[in-house]
C-alpha cells in the first residue's frame, strides 16, 4: 500500500512537472526575446507584464468588464448547450430533421466569423453581437458532438429497452443521455473556453462597452503592450478555469445520474 501511495505521488509530481517546465521555458524565451527587441512597445519583459497584470487586478473597472465578458460567454454556452442537446435528441428519433439540420450546420461552420460580427453589430448592437456570434459557432459544434455521442450508444441496450416497451421520452432520459453524456463531456467542456475566446474576439471587433475586448482595444490604441499581454493571460487563465470547472461539474453529474 505504501508503494502504491509513493507511485501515486510520483505520478502527480510528474504530471505537475510538465506544465511547470513548459511555463518556465516560455518565460525564459520571452525574457530573451524582450531583451532582443529592446522596446516595451514591441515586447515588454515578463516583469513589466506582471506589474501591468497586478495593476489590472486592482482596478474596479477591470472586474466589471471581466464579469460582463464571462457572463456573456456563459450565456452563449448554456444557450448553445440546451439547444444542441434538444436538437440532437430529437434528430435521433426523427431522421428527416437530422437530414434537414445537416446542411444548416455545415453552413454555420463555414460562415466567416468576422463578417458575421460586422453584420451583427449593425443588426443587434455591440452588446448582443458577441453572444450571438458565440452561439452561432458553439451550437453546430455541440450539436455535432452530441449527435456523434448518441450514435455511439450501444444499440443492444436501446433495442432491449424498446422490447420492454420504453417510450421515446424514457429512451432519451434513461438510456441515451446517461450513456452518451460521458462520451461528449470533454468536447462539451472545451466549448466553454472556446465560447470565451469567441466572445472576447467579437467584443474587440464590436468595441463592446465595459468588456475585456474593449479593454484590449484601448490597450492596442495606446500602445500598452504589457497591458494587452496581461489581459490575454488573464483571459487564458479564465478560459482554462471555466473548462476545468465545467468538466468537473459534468463528471460529477454523470456519476450521480448513472
Image (spheres, grey):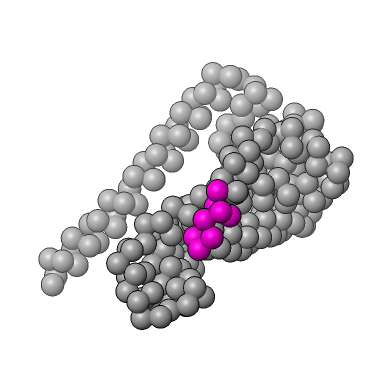
Q: Which residue shows up at 24% across the image and 56% down it?
A: 11
| Count of numbered circles on the image | 0
Question: For the stretch drawn in magenta, what is the main secondary structure?
Answer: helix
- In the shown orientation, is residue 69 left or right of residue 255? right
Q: Which residue shows up at 72% across the image and 41% down it?
A: 202
| Vertical relation: 33 (above or below) 120 | above
Quarter of the image holding residue 133?
top right
Q: Does the magenta stretch include residue 209?
A: no
Give x and y (percent) for residue 81. Answer: 59, 60
| Vertical relation: 110 (above or below) 81 | above
Give x and y (percent) for residue 92. Answer: 49, 60
Quarter of the image holding residue 175?
bottom left
Give x and y (percent) for residue 141. Answer: 55, 48
| Vertical relation: 145 (above or below) 9 | above
Quarter of the image holding residue 24?
top left
| Vertical relation: 104 (above or below) 161 | above
Q: Can residue 77 be seen in this view?
A: no
Give x and y (percent) for residue 72. Answer: 71, 55
The C terminus - image quarter? bottom left
Q: Nearer the viewer, residue 29 or 157?
A: 157
Magenta residues, as a range? 92-99
The N terminus - image quarter? bottom left
Q: Can residue 113 be seen in this view?
A: yes
Q: Residue furthest bottom?
A: 164
Q: Which residue shows up at 54% across the image and 60% down it?
A: 94
Q: Which of 56 and 122 is in front in this view?
A: 122
Q: Which of 108 and 6 is in front in this view?
A: 108
Amino acid at each position: 500500500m505504501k508503494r502504491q501511495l509513493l507511485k501515486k505521488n510520483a505520478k502527480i509530481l510528474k504530471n505537475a512537472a510538465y506544465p511547470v517546465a513548459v511555463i518556465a521555458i516560455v518565460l525564459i524565451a520571452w525574457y530573451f526575446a524582450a531583451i532582443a527587441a529592446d522596446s516595451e512597445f514591441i515586447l515588454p519583459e515578463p516583469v513589466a507584464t506582471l506589474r501591468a497584470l497586478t495593476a489590472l487586478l486592482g482596478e474596479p473597472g477591470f472586474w466589471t468588464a471581466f464579469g460582463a465578458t464571462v457572463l456573456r460567454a456563459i450565456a452563449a454556452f448554456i444557450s448553445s448547450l440546451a439547444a444542441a442537446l434538444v436538437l440532437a435528441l430529437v434528430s435521433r428519433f426523427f431522421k428527416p430533421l437530422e437530414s434537414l439540420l445537416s446542411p444548416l450546420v455545415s453552413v454555420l461552420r463555414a460562415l466567416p466569423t468576422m463578417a458575421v460580427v460586422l453584420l451583427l453589430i449593425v443588426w443587434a448592437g455591440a452588446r448582443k453581437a458577441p453572444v450571438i456570434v458565440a452561439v452561432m459557432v458553439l451550437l453546430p459544434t455541440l450539436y455535432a458532438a452530441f449527435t456523434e455521442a448518441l450514435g455511439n450508444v450501444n444499440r443492444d441496450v436501446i433495442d432491449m429497452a424498446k422490447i420492454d416497451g420504453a417510450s421515446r421520452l424514457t429512451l432519451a432520459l434513461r438510456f441515451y443521455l446517461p450513456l452518451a453524456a460521458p462520451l461528449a463531456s470533454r468536447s462539451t467542456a472545451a466549448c466553454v473556453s472556446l465560447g470565451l475566446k469567441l466572445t472576447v474576439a467579437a467584443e474587440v471587433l464590436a468595441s463592446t462597452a465595459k468588456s475585456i475586448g474593449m479593454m484590449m482595444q484601448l490597450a492596442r490604441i495606446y500602445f500598452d503592450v504589457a497591458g494587452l499581454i496581461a489581459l490575454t493571460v488573464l483571459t487564458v487563465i479564465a478560459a482554462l478555469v471555466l473548462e476545468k470547472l465545467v468538466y468537473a461539474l459534468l463528471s460529477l453529474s454523470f456519476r450521480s445520474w448513472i
